[in-house]
Amino acid sequence: MEREGAERAVHHILSYGGGVNSVALMILLLREQRPLDGVVFADTGGEVPETYAYLDVTRAYLAQHGVPFTVVAKRGRTLYETAWERRVIPSTIWRWSTRDYKVLPILRHYRALGGHVNQYLAIAWDEIERMKSSRVDYVTNLYPLVDRRITRADCVALIQEAGLPIPPKSACFFCPFGTLDRWRWLYATHPDLYEKAMALEERSKHFPAQRLADQAFRERTDISLRTLAELFRDGTPLPVLPAIEQPPCGAECMT
């Protein structure tokens, strides 16, 4: 029987999203010899191939420092399969995809560790509005990049100084927060994934009222991924869009 009042184990874990900020934070933690017992990545099954390839870079770098790298995932269907089955696209309002495929698998991993987890989250100084407290009592969120006023540009410099390649933007290929440039890149680089995203958008029971192109074209309800594909294919000039101040799908995505 555990002695009453005995201290629980404390783990220091980096919640890793695969993007610039989380790679830079990984480098910073190791360089400063901060406590780091592990790094965890929640796989939705819908990342682009470049992100999956970069996981090998991360895994090798951590292995050099003796830090374990764990990939977790929701049991059962991938995020895309679930959205397809439900005939919906991931919601920018309810964020169920982030909750079910990022947050909950990571929390399940933390519970399996036992004790308390100090979770490093890679929010940069210029994204300070994304900071939030943990919603569970066995996790404390830590923000070393904010503490040191490290910006996203600083994160790029940290990665370059460490001699690592700059990671691609980490996001599902059917992310509803996709920008025009992101959709153009996906169309040109991974036409098969663009087709899958377009098929999901059109299969949604809420289409065309809700589209994956909503964030890039808030004032143009006539533009869908199929419309964009036609414009990309024909080389038609696209309108210059204003910057959209919208947070990504959640801090745990860590882009």
Image (cartoon, rainbow, N blue to C red):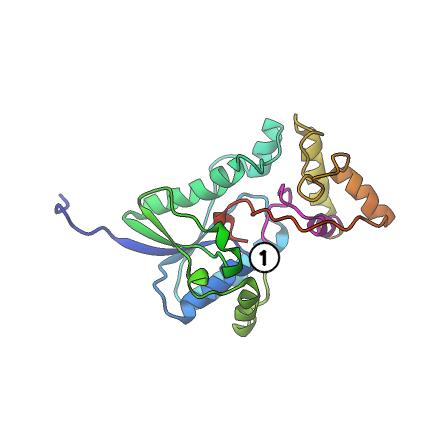
- The residue segment tinted magenta is 168-187
Horizontally, residue 91 falls left or right of residue 201, namely left
Horizontally, residue 14 falls left or right of residue 204, namely left
Q: Nearer the viewer, residue 18 or 255?
A: 255
In this view, the residue farthest toward the top is: 205
Residue 163: x %, y % from top left: 55, 73
Residue type pointed to by label 1 = Ala
Q: On the rendered image, what quadrant is the N terminus found in?
A: top left
Horizontally, residue 180 falls left or right of residue 121, namely right
Residue 147: x %, y % from top left: 42, 62
Magenta segment, prevailing SS (helix, strand or loop): loop
Q: Give the residue at x 53% y 65%.
A: 155
List the residue tagged with mark 1. 53
Q: Give the residue at x 39% y 43%.
A: 107
Give the quadrant of residue 159: bottom right
Secondary structure beneath label 1: helix
Horizontally, residue 128 falls left or right of residue 243, namely left
Residue 126: x %, y % from top left: 53, 59
For residue 177, above or below residue 202: below
Visible residue check, residue 60: no
Residue 241: x %, y % from top left: 73, 49
